[in-house]
Each structure stands twice: as C-alpha cells, then as structure tokens.
Image (tube, rainbow, N blue to C red):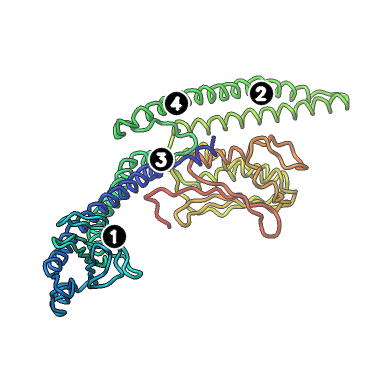
Amino acid sequence: MRERLAGAPSVRRRLLLFLVPALLLLVIGAGSLAYLVALSVATTNYDRSLLDPVLDLAENIRVGADGPRLDMLLQAQQALLFDHADTLVFQIRAIDSTVIAGTPALAAPPPLAVGEPRFYDGMYGKEPVRIAAVLSRNGFYVLVGETLHKRQRLIWEVLAAELVPTLLIALVVIVLAWTGVTHGLAPLARIRDELQGRGPDDLHPLDETSAPPEISPAIKAFNNLLGRIRVASAVQQRFLASAAHQLRTPLAGVRMHLELVLRRDLAGDLRAEIESAHMATMRASQLAAQLLVLARAEGAGATGGDTERFDLRDIAATAVQQWVPRALARSIDLGFALEPAPLCGNPLLMAELLNNLIDNAIRYTPQGGAVTVCTGHADGEVFVSVEDNGNGIPEEARDRVFERFYRVPGTPGEGSGLGLAIVHEVAERHRGTVGLEARAGGGARFTARFPAPATTKRT
C-alpha cells in the first residue's frame, strides 16, 4: 500500500499531464492555422504584385520584319524588375518554345488562354521561385519569376505575431493553474501540518469549519475514525488499569501470607521453596504496579492528563531520598547534582520516570559502584539524567532496551523489562525524548529531555 501511494501522481502532476499536452496541441493547431493563413496572404498579395511586370512586358512585344522583339529599353527593364529583397527574371517565348528574350532557365508554363494569368512554382538555378505567366494577344508567353524571400519573411512575421501571444497565454495558463492548485490545496497542507505535529495518541478531531466543501466529507469520515479509535483506546486502557489494579490486591494478600509463613520454623528445603514463591509474588506485584503506571501514562497521552507546572529538581530530590536506603544496602554511592528544571506536565508520571531510571541504575550497578542523578536547563530544554559506573549496555542492544519486556541477554537480576518502557512512554507523553549513551570509564547514562515552558528563563 505504501509503495502504491508513493508512486501515485500528485494533483499538480496530474494537472500538468493534462494541461501541457492539451496546450501543446493547441499551439500546434494555432501554428498550423497561422501558417496556412500567412501562406495564403503572402501568396495572394505578392502574386498580385508579380503580375504587374508580366502585363507590362506583354504590352511591349512587337512583331516586325525581322521577327518578334521586346520593345523596351534595358534601363526600363531593370527598373521594372528591380526589387530590394528578391531577384526577378523574365522570359518571353513563342508558341514553339523559342525563347525570344530573357532567361531560358524558367520552366515552360502549362497551356494558357489569351489574357489568363497563371501562377506556379519553379526553380531558377538552385533557388525556388514563384512564376507568373500570361499569353499575350499576339501569341507569346510572358513569364516573370521571383525568389521567395519577401514571402518567407511575411510568413514568419505572421507566425510570430500569432504564436508568441499563444505561447505566452499557454505559459500564463500553466502558472495560473499551478498557483490555483497550490491555493486550493492549502487546506490539505494545513491538515497535514496539524497531523504531523500531533503526538502518537492525540486523537482529538480535526476542525471541520474551515475545510472546503470538497474535502469536508473526508474530514468528517476521518474524525469518525478517530472517534472509534479513541473509544477503543479508552476501553483498552480501562481494561489494563482494572486488570493491574485487581491483581495487586490478591498478590498483596499472598505476599503477606508467605511472609507470615516465613516467620515460622521451617525445614531448609521447605523454606527455600516458600522464599522462591515469595520472590515470584514480589515480582508479580512489581509487574502489576508497572502495568498500572504504563496504563496511566498511555491514558494521560490520549486524554491530555493532569498538567501543571513543577520543577524536576524537586521531584528528583524526593526520588533520591526514597532510594537512599536501597543504595546503602548495596553499598552504592547515590549522588546528585540538581539545578532548576521547570517543566509543565504530570508530576506523578515524571516521578515514575525518575524512579524507574534510578531503580534500573541501582539494580544493575555492582556493589560499591556509584549512581548520579542530574537535572538542569540548557538550549531551551530541561533534562534529567541518571548515570552509573556499572557494566553498561552493549551497543547492539541500545535500540531495544526501551521495548516492553525486553531484557539484555545475560543480564542478572529479576527485572520485568517494563521499567525503561515506562520511561520512554512518559517522555513521549511530555513531548520529550530519552537517550542512552555509554559513560566514559564504563557504565551508562540515560538522559530525558523535554521542551522548556515558554515563560521559562535560564537562571
């Protein structure tokens, strides 16, 4: 489907594929018509002017005792046949094809009636000429040939006068069509920009009031689809939250009973089995709690959640205090470097993000290691980072550690693979990003960055 959509021609391309051939045919048709008109005009006008020297020559043919001759001075002939653009030549021949005067290079005319002019094309040397012929009253053929320079220039002038405006009109039509399509598609571009700027769970309907009537039905259908997805997502989140919540109560009861049993005197093998069951119950309780947090994070993304202004520094300080006993139990130095980091969002979800990052760092840092929590504000963003000096994460696994239920192969511990997925989900719901990088000297650094509030100023 994606390949088919990628190969589909755009509206502009469809328009050009329709307009360009149509306009090209229009230009060709207009050019052909203009050429025919220009040829007719040039032929009619110049043939008429070419007939004048033919008639003058015919009037000056005399037949004397020494035979027929042209009774016209050479200067008069030159003046009669002078032209600044073309070359004119003449020929006078008898009925028996004997050339009496002029050049013999002109082709003989077809049979003519007395006084009837005839025009035809011929050659004079290697140059085409237009020939006018008439049969005089005393029975001689008079021919005058003229080269075609003036005719061709007139044809090109007429073609230019006709085609240049046509081409300009065609170009203007293409530009206007392109501009019109761009203007007409502007509402679709606004819808595209709005959709691209949304988060993955932003399912509120599109504005139908500013949509043109042509695309309003499509927007309504899309809004209906968004509504159905919104309802299905809400049902899924309610089910996940309810299931996780309902699991917490019986698991807490089982855990309490197992702890009571462990207080009694038990045989070694029986105690080991019960302790194993107790650890499994604790993991299940933690998994249910994480699923509940994940459902709350996804629900906040879909509905907008409770948004307020808070400081990441305060949340980080509280989280560090809560995790100090756990860090001391493992001889881990839990330190912090906290600077103001104001943010707008859900403080409960942000606390879960920090708790999961700190829990992940303490869980996988060897005894005697160090974990450091930092907050701050830089380059228009606020950030929180948690770094450790543990074994780090292999480069090939860094792109997958934020996937749900994924654990790096060979990783010790009893994690469920949901902690970093929750971190990623909460960061996305706050329009932020979370990144992982190797720490110099070994270990890993997780950094979550969020856009700072518009009124926030660096201190």
The answer to whether marks 3 and 1 mark residues whose Cβ atoms lie closer than 8 Å is no
In three-dimensional space, the C-alpha distance between marks 4 and 2, rounded to whole angstroms, equals 41 Å
Packing grade of label 2 (10 A; few <14, some 14-19, many >=20) is: some
* Lower position in the chain sequence, tag 3 or tag 1: 1
The disc placed on residue 121 is 1
Mark 2 and mark 1 lie on one chain; the one further toward the N terminus is 1
Q: Which residue is mark 2?
A: 252
Q: Regarding mark 2 in the picture, which secondary structure is present there?
A: helix
How many numbered marks have been drawn onto this rendered protein structure?
4
For the residues bearing labels 4 and 1, Cβ distance under 8 angstroms:
no
Frontmost of labels 3 and 2 is 3
Left or right: 67 with respect to 247?
A: left
- Work out whether 355 lies above or below 340: above
Amino acid type, residue under disc 2 in the picture: Ala
The percent coordinates of residue 98 (x first, y second) are: 27, 68
- Judging by the rendered image, the residue that carries numbered circle 3 is 192
Whole-percent x and y of residue 61?
A: 14, 69
Q: Quick one: 317 or 311, which is closer to the camera? A: 311
| Amino acid type, callout 4 | Leu
